[in-house]
Image (spheres, rainbow, N blue to C red):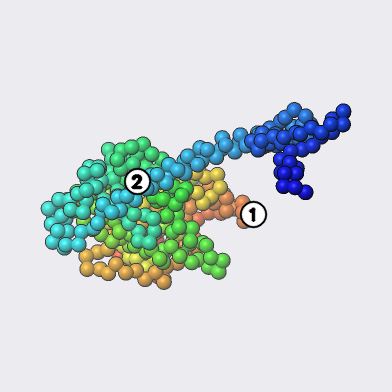
Amino acid sequence: MSKKDKELIEDTQTEITAEGKKEKKKKPCLIIRIFKFFIPWKGDSAGDVIRKLIFIASLAVFIITAVPLLTDVAEMYHDEKISQELNDIYIPDEDPIVIEKAEEEGVPLPSFDKLLEINKDVVGYIRINGTAINYPVVRGENNDDYLNHDIYGNPNRSGTIMMDYRNDIRKNDKSDNYVVYGHNMAIGTFFSGLNDYWRTLYDSYDGASIKMYKEHPTITFNTLYEQSEWKIFAIGLFNTNYNHGEVFDYINKLDFEDAEDFNDYIIDIMDRSDIFTDVDIQYGDDILTLSTCVWPYPDNEYIRLGVFARKVRPGESKEVNVNVAKVNAYVKRWQWVYDYVAKQMGVQSYDWSYSTWDRRKLLSYTKEEADADGYIFQ
């Protein structure tokens, strides 16, 4: 067979007309063939038409759903790129004289100069080594502006890591409890990394691994005027919906009236903490509270995760004995959880009735207070 004959066979189809003559019929172009495969066409059977209509409807639903989702993800990565560009801008100060001057005289540390040029609302910088949490912290005139604005003031989905607007970082007026908020972003950015503290408490079949806490027991949080390490002592879930039971306002306790007020707050936190650590606490310690959204239970978007730490004291080592940390087997929750657990267990009711935290870790808690509370030191 000649080369010409082969090309003819490959490029044309042959039909025999009524007169017995051969007629060349060209194949439709690729685009038309694709259209004919997916879109109803003249000559299609009823089954083909139905198949193609179902495909078109499914494709439309996919596009309507996927495009906004992909847009959101792209925006999140864009927000993260903007934030991480600031990493190179902030380099902690190392000169002890400069650090002492900033704290004593109330002047911003030089390491914040460039960030303050970008935004005068910058009040600090937070970092948990080995995680994606590595961001400047701002404080606005309220707790809403930076929920959906970046550090440059531009609208965005991810917001900015922010301190509660009621907090004060000045030496003589410093708040007792710094409360810092951040979004839990789906791509693992901003404060989503905090979720691993709670999730890994229960991620082992043969017992609690507490993996995240053991690897990251401390937080670096520097304000404009001081550089500090903080030891995590509690991690807990909190309800914000009164219809679901108790709402414990951990974010609204920024200052303590006295030792008793402080002790009561810490005991309340520890009863609700999923973890007990080797970190002791006492009245006069500075407290750092990190807060973000979390969804460990079905159909419950009102839950918040709180991670609590206290500042390393002067002359104290920042090292933590993580090996003695353990899960609180009898953590205090709220009514929705009790009802949910009771249903899972097949019982009528489930509730919390007593504290299991060793209050010897609360150094400012006296025997007299314990006697008044009916608590017996172990």
Name the residue nearer the viewer: 260 or 315.
Answer: 315
Q: Are there few (<14), some (14-19), or many (20+) residues within 10 Å of tag 1?
A: few
| Pair 2/1: label in front | 2
- Numbered circle sitting on residue 321: none
Residue lying at 23% horizontally and 58% vertically, measured from the top left: 92
Q: What residue occupies the far front of the structure in this picture?
A: 2
Q: What residue occupies the far right of the structure in this picture?
A: 19
Which residue position holds label 2? 82
Name the residue nearer the viewer: 243 or 141.
Answer: 141
Q: Residue 171, can we see it?
A: no
Vertical side of 374 occupied by 120: above or below: above
Left or right position of 95 against 232 = left
Left or right position of 97 against 164 = left
Kindly indicate the quadrant of the structure image that contains residue 158.
top left
Q: Amino acid at mark 1?
A: Gly
Q: Secondary structure at mark 1?
A: loop
Residue lying at 36% horizontally and 52% vertically, measured from the top left: 290
Q: Are there few (<14), some (14-19), or many (20+) residues within 10 Å of tag 2?
A: some
Q: Residue 11 at what x, y percent from top left?
A: 71, 40
Residue lying at 27% horizontally and 63% vertically, measured from the top left: 312
Q: Residue 136 at what x, y percent from top left?
A: 30, 50
Left or right position of 378 against 21 = left
Going from the N terminus, do you reach mark 2 or mark 1 first? 2
Residue lying at 72% horizontally and 35% vertically, measured from the top left: 26
Q: Amino acid at mark 2?
A: Ile
Q: Residue 112 at what x, y percent from top left?
A: 21, 51
Q: Residue 44, can we see it?
A: yes
Vertical side of 141 occupied by 334: above or below: below
Q: Secondary structure at mark 2?
A: helix
Which residue position holds label 1? 346
Vertical side of 156 occupied by 187: above or below: below
